[in-house]
Structure formats: structure tokens, C-alpha cells
């Protein structure tokens, strides 16, 4: 019993090597294409037997980057120039390398194999690390897990080699330099000894230097003094040796944090129509809503994953403006994004399974519905925000919020509503504009205005030029012309002097006045510039209107 527990607690890592990723990707793409000139099985087989490869430009020359099995049997290897390869195999078919497409496929496969473990890390350019500690028993042991994984990749038409060991270093070495397999717990050091020094994931220059010194295997390195190796090659060599032998830990950084609340549905046969996916989404939303509600929480961000039968993965994301525990709203947020994927998904290999999880949760905010219906209206507003965001995209629905600046034109900023916590947003909306702002003493030339808001509701961008007449040069206007209409000022308050920010460089100081004409209309005006400071006379503008 104790021995069994020890084995279960021991860390186990699976390394997955897609040694012909580029060529497999191209073969999968060809399988989706219809070739009228090769409509028979014999014609297709003849085409598949033709040697193929990819090439890239290196050092001014075109070099083979990858070769398929038929090309290898013809004697071609990566690194040959394209001219040399065509001399050996005149009928070679080549395609430019596409590292971006290879990386997209690798990322998709990394998301697809998280059905075995949530801890999946990428080893560029063509490998994956899977921490399967405590997961193998779900598949009947490590042998069953490997069989299931290899059969799945065979259906996806991808060549793969796997290795399992106690740590990432040993799993990597066994897979790439010993043909793969399962290393029993505690037996990694013995299996590493005969492998070449390249199995320690060393730089090519360092591995070549070790080989020239006669240190060609991991066993040879163990017989040397660690101090001498460190002096000659640095700490990188001993670190890799310690990682491979398990003396130094090496964490696997997963693609994304493991979700705490996740629900999944697997179909008996791959679905070719999205209607079945929508039905599964509604059922999964009910299950997820029940789970988050049990914890007194709600979902703020949701993710829905579609796993295709060919290994490709599609993810859709949705955010909510408040904590959600309503399955109908969860499904409504994700459905528009799924509809945009319908045509693309339905022409592929079909949906094998779907998964829904809460990426981010928050405490539910219980509401006491009042007689005036205010909370009921806020719930309707939240639904409207979520619907518009789902239709128009994240960040498209914004609200105006106050900013900490004394410049009027910069006092309001627009930001996505879902970014700001709801309580803070409500406080910002309820705060009276201009509260707590200092106002300069009133000048005696005109009557004092009754107490009003210090900032108008409506601002003009840019401010509009006016012609004015003032009783004194630096006083408020007694009449002005705006939009070809004369206005006679009845009362005024100011000035409120606003200088430019020190980091904006040279700018003109503005004196703001709140003025009211004889008809009771209130204007927010400013004089730009100071008398005597420049040769040009100050100019007047209307910046806003009070309600």
C-alpha cells in the first residue's frame, strides 16, 4: 500500500515529439483538397509517393528544411541545398516553409491534449510536455494513456513519438534519442547513461566541443569533475545534467491556468451541424451555473472550446458586465460568437467534444428590488451591455468616466464598461461634476451668479471662437457674438485660471468665466492668453453650455 502511494505521488512527465510536423501539416491540407486529375485511388497513391519537402532561405541559399518519408528513402536530408536535392531527386516537390502555420497547429494540438492533463507546455518548434502525475489511472495506466494518445494522433494523421519519465529532461532525452518508451520510476539515470550528450538539450557548439574532448555520452560526463566542467563550459552544462537526473526541478509552464469550474460533453459521433453544439451549450451552461451558484459566485468570463475530430481546436470567449449564474445569459453570450464559426466548423471534420468553463468568477451581488424598480433597471442594463458586447466585440461598449486632471478637455475618458467594477462606475456616475473644485474670487463688475455646477454638461470639441467686448481688459465680457448672434451678459462669475500642465511644454493660460445672458442662457467661456504677455491680444472661446 505504501509502495503504491509512493508511485502515485512521484512526478511523471510525458514528452510528445511531432518529428514531422511540417510535412504532416501539408499532408493534412492536401487531404482536404479535391484534385480532379487524380480522382482514382491509384492516382492519389502515386501522388502521395512522390518525395516532398519544405525549403527556407539561409545564408543566401535555399535549403531543405524538412523532408517526408519518401524523400528520406530517396536519400534526402534536411540541410541540403535545393539545387543538390533536385540533382538527387529531379521529381522532388517542394513548398516554402511556414513556421507560423506549424506553430498554429502545435498550439491547437496543445489545447487538444489537455483532455489528458491540464498541465500542457510547449517545447518549440515541435514538442509538447504533459505532466501526467495522477492522471494515468484514468486511462488504465501509463500504457493505456500512451495507446489512447497515439491512436488519436493516428486518426489526426500526425506522426508522433512519446516518452514517459520522472522529469521533463529524461522524457525529452528518451523520446528524441532512444526511440521513446516508458522509463520505470527511478530508472532514468541508468537509461540516460548511454545516450549522447545532445540528449541533455545542450547548444550545438557545446555538444560539439564535448565530443571533441571525447565526452560523447551522458555516462562520460558523470565521470568528470563537476567543478572542472563548470569552469570549462559554465553552469549551463551541470544544470542540464542535474535536471535530466532529477536533482534540480524543472517546472512545466502550462498554456493557461487550470480552470476550477469546467464541464464537458463528448459526442458519440462527430457532429457536422452546429445545432447539436448549441443544444450541448445550453445543457453545459445549466450545469456550470449550478456549480458556480453553489459557491455563491458567478462567472465574469466564460470560455467555450470545440474539439474537432482531426485535432483542431476552436475557442470562443465572452465577458459579462456582472457576475452571472443564469444559464440562459451564459448561453446567450457565447451563441453569437459560435454562429460566426458555423460555416468554418461545419466544413471541417466535425465536432468530437465541447467544453465550457468559467475563466474568471466573482461573488454574486444579491439585489433588493425597490419599489421604484432601480435594481431591476440595472439588471436590464447589464443584459443590454452583455448583448451589445457579444455582437460588437470586446471594448466596443464604453462609458464616460472622470479623470484626475485639471484640464477641462481631458477631464472625461472613455473606457469599456466591463473593465470598471460596477460599484465604482455607479459612484462615478452619481458624483456631481466639479465637486470640490476651487473657484477664483468673483470680480465686482457684474452681479454674482447663483451657485451652479462649476462644469457644464455639454462641452464643445474644439471650443468655438467668439467676439467679445469687456468692461476692463482682464474682466468678463459684457456682450459677445457667437454663431452670428449677439448676446448681452446679465451676470458673470470668475475668472478660474487654468494653466497648462508642466509636462506639456509652452502653452497659454486660460481664464474661465461662467456667464448668463439676459434670456437666462448660461455659457462657459474662457479667454486664452494674458494681456501684455504676448503681442497678440487674447482670444475668447465658448467651451460649453450649462443646462
Image (spheres, rainbow, N blue to C red):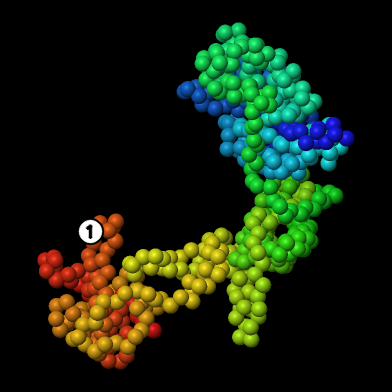
Q: Is 123 rendered above or below residue 307?
A: above
Q: Which residue lies furthest to the front in this view?
A: 2
Residue under numbered circle 1: 506
Which quarter of the rendering shows the N terminus?
A: top right
Number of numbered discs: 1
Q: Is 301 rendered above or below residue 203?
A: below
**Residue drawn at (27%, 69%) of the image:** 498
**Residue drawn at (84%, 39%) of the image:** 137
**Residue drawn at (53%, 23%) of the image:** 62
Q: In which quarter of the image is residue 47?
A: top right
Q: Which of 531 and 245 is in front in this view?
A: 245
Which class describes the residues within 10 Å of circle 1: few (<14), some (14-19), or many (20+)? few
Q: Where is residue 99 in the image (x, y as percent from the top left)?
A: 58, 34
Q: Is 202 rendered above or below residue 417?
A: above
**Residue drawn at (64%, 35%) of the image:** 251
| Residue 390 located left or right of residue 187 | left
Q: Can residue 483 be seen in this view?
A: no
Q: Which of 346 and 456 is in front in this view?
A: 456
Q: In which quarter of the image is residue 391?
A: bottom right
Q: Where is residue 148 in the image (x, y as percent from the top left)?
A: 82, 36
Which quarter of the rendering shows the C terminus?
A: bottom left
SS of the residue under disc 1 = loop
Q: Where is residue 230 in the image (x, y as percent from the top left)?
A: 54, 18
Q: Can residue 120 be seen in this view?
A: yes
Q: In which quarter of the image is residue 126?
A: top right
Amino acid at each position: 500500500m505504501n509502495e503504491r502511494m509512493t508511485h502515485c505521488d512521484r512526478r511523471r512527465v510525458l514528452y510528445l515529439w511531432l518529428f514531422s510536423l511540417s510535412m504532416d501539416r501539408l499532408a493534412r491540407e492536401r487531404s482536404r483538397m479535391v484534385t480532379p486529375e487524380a480522382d482514382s485511388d491509384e492516382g492519389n497513391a502515386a501522388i502521395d509517393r512522390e518525395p516532398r519537402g519544405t525549403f527556407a532561405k539561409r545564408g543566401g541559399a535555399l535549403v531543405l528544411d524538412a523532408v517526408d518519408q519518401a524523400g528520406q528513402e530517396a536519400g534526402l536530408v534536411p540541410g541540403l541545398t535545393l539545387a543538390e536535392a533536385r540533382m538527387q531527386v529531379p521529381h522532388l516537390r517542394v513548398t516554402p516553409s511556414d513556421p507560423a502555420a506549424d506553430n498554429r497547429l502545435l498550439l491547437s494540438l496543445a489545447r487538444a491534449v489537455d483532455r489528458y492533463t491540464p498541465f500542457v507546455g510547449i517545447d518549440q518548434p515541435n514538442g509538447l510536455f504533459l505532466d501526467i502525475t495522477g492522471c494515468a489511472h484514468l486511462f488504465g495506466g501509463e500504457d493505456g494513456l500512451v495507446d489512447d494518445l497515439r491512436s488519436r494522433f493516428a486518426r489526426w494523421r500526425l506522426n508522433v513519438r512519446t516518452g514517459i519519465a520522472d522529469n521533463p529532461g529524461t522524457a525529452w532525452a528518451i523520446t528524441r534519442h532512444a526511440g521513446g518508451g516508458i522509463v520505470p520510476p527511478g530508472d532514468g539515470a541508468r537509461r540516460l547513461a548511454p545516450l549522447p550528450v545532445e540528449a541533455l538539450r545542450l547548444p550545438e557548439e557545446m555538444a560539439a566541443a564535448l565530443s571533441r574532448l571525447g565526452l560523447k555520452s551522458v555516462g562520460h560526463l558523470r565521470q568528470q569533475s563537476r567543478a572542472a566542467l563548470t569552469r570549462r563550459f559554465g553552469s549551463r552544462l551541470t544544470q542540464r545534467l542535474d535536471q535530466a537526473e532529477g536533482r534540480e526541478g524543472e517546472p512545466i509552464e502550462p498554456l493557461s491556468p487550470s480552470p476550477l469550474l469546467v464541464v464537458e460533453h463528448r459526442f458519440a459521433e462527430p457532429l457536422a451541424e452546429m445545432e447539436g453544439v448549441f443544444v450541448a451549450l445550453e445543457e453545459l451552461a445549466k450545469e456550470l451555473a449550478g456549480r458556480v451558484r453553489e459557491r455563491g459566485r458567478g462567472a465574469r468570463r466564460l470560455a467555450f472550446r470545440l474539439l474537432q475530430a482531426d485535432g483542431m481546436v476552436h475557442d470562443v470567449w465572452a465577458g459579462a458586465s456582472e457576475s452571472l449564474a443564469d444559464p440562459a445569459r451564459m448561453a446567450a453570450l457565447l451563441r453569437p460568437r459560435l454562429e460566426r464559426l458555423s460555416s468554418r466548423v461545419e466544413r471541417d471534420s466535425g465536432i468530437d467534444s465541447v467544453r465550457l468553463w468559467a475563466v474568471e468568477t466573482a461573488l454574486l451581488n444579491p439585489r433588493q428590488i425597490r419599489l421604484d424598480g432601480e435594481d431591476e433597471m440595472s439588471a436590464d442594463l447589464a443584459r443590454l451591455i452583455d448583448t451589445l458586447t457579444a455582437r460588437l466585440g470586446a471594448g466596443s461598449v464604453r462609458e464616460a468616466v472622470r479623470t484626475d486632471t485639471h484640464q477641462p478637455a481631458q477631464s472625461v475618458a472613455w473606457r469599456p464598461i466591463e473593465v470598471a467594477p460596477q460599484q465604482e462606475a455607479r459612484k462615478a456616475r452619481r458624483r456631481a461634476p466639479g465637486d470640490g473644485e476651487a473657484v477664483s474670487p468673483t470680480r465686482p463688475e457684474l452681479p454674482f451668479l447663483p451657485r451652479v455646477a462649476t462644469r457644464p454638461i455639454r462641452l464643445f470639441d474644439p471650443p468655438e471662437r467668439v467676439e467679445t467686448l469687456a468692461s476692463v481688459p482682464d474682466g468678463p465680457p459684457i456682450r459677445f457674438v457667437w454663431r452670428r448672434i449677439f448676446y448681452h451678459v446679465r451676470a458673470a462669475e470668475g475668472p478660474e485660471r487654468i494653466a497648462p500642465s508642466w509636462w506639456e511644454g509652452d502653452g497659454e493660460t486660460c481664464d474661465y468665466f461662467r456667464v448668463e445672458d439676459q434670456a437666462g442662457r448660461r455659457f462657459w467661456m474662457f479667454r486664452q492668453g494674458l494681456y501684455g504677455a504676448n503681442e497678440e491680444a487674447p482670444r475668447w472661446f465658448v467651451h460649453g453650455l450649462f443646462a
